[in-house]
Amino acid sequence: MVIEAGGPGPSAALALCVTALIATGTGAAPPEPAATARAAAALPYQDPSLPVADRVGDLLARMSLDDKLGQMTQIEKDSLVPQSDLATYRIGSVLSGGDSTVSPNNAQTWADTYDSLQRTALTTPLGIPMIYGIDAVHGHNAVRGATLFPHNIGLGATRDPALVQDVGHAVAEEVSGTGIDWDFAPCLCVARNDRWGRTYESFGETPELPSAMTTFITGLQGQTLGAGPASVLATAKHYIGDGGTGGGVDQGDTQVSEAELRAVHLPPFKEAVRRGVGAVMLSYSSWNGVRSHANKYLVTDVLKGELGFGGFVVSDWAAVDQLDGQTGFTGAEIATAVNAGVDMAMVPHDYKKFLSLLRGEVSAGRVSQARVDDANRRILTKKFQLGLFEKPLTDRSYTATVGSAAHRSLARQAVRASQVLLKNDGGVLPLPKSARLFVAGKSADDIGNQSGGWTVGWQGRSGAVTDGTTILQGIRAAVTDPSRVTYDRYGNGIDSGYTAAVAVVGETPYAEGRGDRPGSLGLDQEDLQTLARLKASGVPVVVVLVSGRPLDTAAQLPDWKALLAAWLPGTEGAGVADVLFGAYAPAGKLPMSWMSSAAQEPVNDGDGKVPLFPYGYGLTYGGTQPDPDPTPTPT
């Protein structure tokens, strides 16, 4: 690929500045490259006093075709070999995929990595900064030691849009502390079948609940993108209908009428656009056989036209490469996606081939220059609004917020607000702090299990994967005498002398694809055997269910005195203990209907089926909290 020279720009001054920055090995002491460039040659696009639209227009007029095609290309950090390719190929965006990491994995290393890549991006003749994206879907979950909040299903149970906005702002601060400026969140899918492995990424099964929780976008971006501190570009995903696929199959086909698509799946995106969301990510799934990445009607006509979305559309990971069902990019696939309305392709690896093919499609007229300019205008507008041209490097004042006490306190608040009490026979809860307790279950003392997927790795894993407080640790901290709490994962050693047995059971971590459950939705054999041992002791059994969705528990429910749906609470397990011991009364409401059996799936509010527990159900201490309309109104 031949790189055309860019238009007039501050290349000499910028190159000198970047050389000095790289030589220091730190982003703290030298002046920022963009600032030095402005001082050397104050072109209109470098003037922050001008309107963004004027700056974008000036910059576009100076860009070569290769500059423009590069802006439409997003690549995985680890595929960038050598790093200089970031500048050579004018790449506009970098991302870290679900398993992409740094070593050592801490906030400082992430920030240093970001700054190194950004300095490279700024060595191009026009000095256009990159924008870096990551899936911070329940906190800055790729970073060990970050605060991990409840997954969206738990936040939906809180019915508290203001709390969710606070969570979004905390995530923005932690993301900003690592330099990263773009979050692939929130997921606004309306999950209609609990068999789907991404159910926990949904705030709820009705369009009203995810719509209300778009306050997360305001938390990330601020009231206006870039206008306040720690403003991070938000992404509404996955457009559209991924929660409605047949059988709950990931990347499947949502076979519904347009009226149902608009009534159920479109409203959260409409609300996201109203809030000024900066990016929209398309879904791998199809609507009536047409993939979202190829659907010009839904992307260009509905999203950009009818809804008036002014940000940019990004593909999902390698999704453009899926359009023809074969491995490897083709020019036809790329032209189809770009013409459908994709502004930036998450390539993520073979960027040289992608750029070559995209250039060929433009040269042949199959992708118009007007479409390329429109995509660039949308992308560059967000870069200017974020202030990347003025402050391209990490704001280190936020680095210390990663895993901070203030954020962990907020996460604990979110955990306790997300707990849904489904059964409480005889008022066994709240537990007395002086009680003699037996704690069992594979998720009682496992930070990985309680955090779920997308936790220091795409699929997540069991074990001590990050820092935090397990549910068992929270229980021990809550009682008056920790020596009166006995723990055995499998329930061995229990006798009738205990006040109660607390069984923390449920699912182990998973993410998309691997999390689909086409068969049983019940507890696994280890859980069932643990629960049988506890029941045999005659001690009242309190079940804390750690899961990414409702599970098929109807057959076992009569054996339990209490059932608390804890969802996937994240790193602050003390929030679960807060509810178990009555420091806070449970207030969560079911964001999903709770199946009476797996055979009932899909079961959703208003479909005429009778679930075990209906959407919006939730007890508190002293009885049921009556709430005929448990869905809040967005603020």
Image (spheres, grey):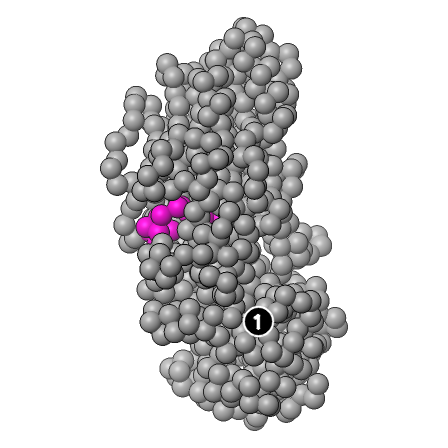
Q: Between residue 534 and residue 388, name the one nearer to us.
A: 534
On the rendered image, what quadrant is the C terminus found in?
bottom left
Q: Between residue 299 and residue 634, name the one nearer to us.
A: 299
| Residue 606 percent across, percent down from the top left | 31, 42
On the rendered image, what quadrant is the N terminus found in?
bottom right
| Residue 90 percent across, percent down from the top left | 63, 80
Q: Secondary structure at mark 1?
A: strand
Disc 1 packing (10 Å; few <14; some 14–19; many ≥20): many
Would residue 464 be seen by someone viewing this image from the given angle? Answer: yes
Q: Between residue 367 and residue 275, name the one nearer to us.
A: 367
What residue appears at the point 36 percent right and 54 percent down from the top-left corner? 264
Q: Is residue 45 magenta?
A: no
Magenta stretch in the rendered image: 200-212
- Number of disc labels: 1
502 displayed left or right of 257: right
- Picture layout, residue 74 above or below residue 127: above
Q: Is residue 202 magenta?
A: yes
Q: Between residue 536 and residue 381, name the one nearer to us.
A: 536
| Residue 357 percent across, percent down from the top left | 65, 81
What residue appears at the point 29 percent right and 26 percent down from the top-left corner? 624
- Picture layout, residue 464 above or below residue 11: above
- The residue wearing badge 1 is 345
- Picture layout, residue 255 above or below residue 583: below
Would residue 407 be seen by someone viewing this image from the given angle? Answer: no
Q: Amino acid at mark 1?
A: Ala
What residue appears at the point 46 percent right and 82 percent down from the top-left corner? 374
What residue appears at the point 65 percent right and 62 percent down from the top-left corner? 112
Residue located farthest toward the bottom when viewing the structure as drawn: 8
